[in-house]
Image (spheres, grey):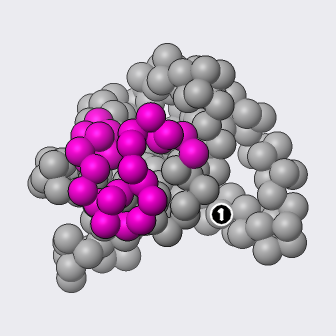
Amino acid sequence: MVQWSDSERSIITSIFSSLDYEDIGPKALCRCLIVYPWTQRYFGAYGNLYNPAAIKSNPLIAAHGVKVLHGLDRAVKNMDDIKATYAELSVLHSEKLHVDPDNFRLLADCLTIVIAAKMGSAFTCDVQAALQKFVAVVKCLWEEFNGTLLPEVLSVSTVALYYSHVNKCMNKKLKKKCAYFRFY
């Protein structure tokens, strides 16, 4: 079970209650597809994704971006049992769609950037820490079906350690080993 402080709960709830899903969701997904073009392979049925303008104007991409945020909203409303909330969706993405779990980290990073840009100076270090912890928990759940375990207690320092490890692996081109990194 993930431990959430009252402050973290308040921050995360506040962020998601103030978001315009129709604006933020499409921007985050578009950013991910443009900055990391290899993530487009999962959206082959979505039509023309040949350039940034086509991605930004694609209504199917925009709709999926909104759907992603509504999915995260489910986690916000069920912070004490995110694992059960996402069980079915995790199986869909990992076993049926075979989505690389690293893509969720990329999308989470893009979402953080879009939210930070929207919030401006209100996006403080405390807000970022709470949001990063939240998206890390969600990301860990996707990876659980690909060899990574969700820790019993996830703190900001644990998230920092995890991302530090992933970055080292990526820098050393050991990305495959990162997929099997476990929290102990």
Does the segment drawn in magenta span residue 99? Answer: no
**How would you rate the neighbour count of disc 1 (Cα within 10 Å): few for under 14, some for 14-19, many for 20 or more?**
some
Is residue 6 shown to the viewer in this render?
A: no
Residue at 21% of width from left, 82% of height from top? 121
* Foreground residue among 54 and 145: 54
Does the segment drawn in magenta span residue 65? Answer: yes
Residue at 86% of width from left, 72% of height from top? 172
Residue at 80% of width from left, 58% of height from top? 175
Residue type at mark 1: give it. Tyr
Q: Compared to 13, does 24 lie above or below?
A: below
The location of residue 126, given as percent across then percent down, is 35, 70
Image quadrant holding the C terminus, namely: top right
Q: Compared to 35, does 108 lie above or below?
A: above
Q: What residue would you read off at disc 1?
A: 163
For the stretch drawn in magenta, the main secondary structure is: helix
Magenta range is 41-67
The location of residue 12, given as percent across then percent down, is 29, 51
In the figure, is residue 36 to the left or right of 5? right
- The quarter holding residue 130 reads bottom left
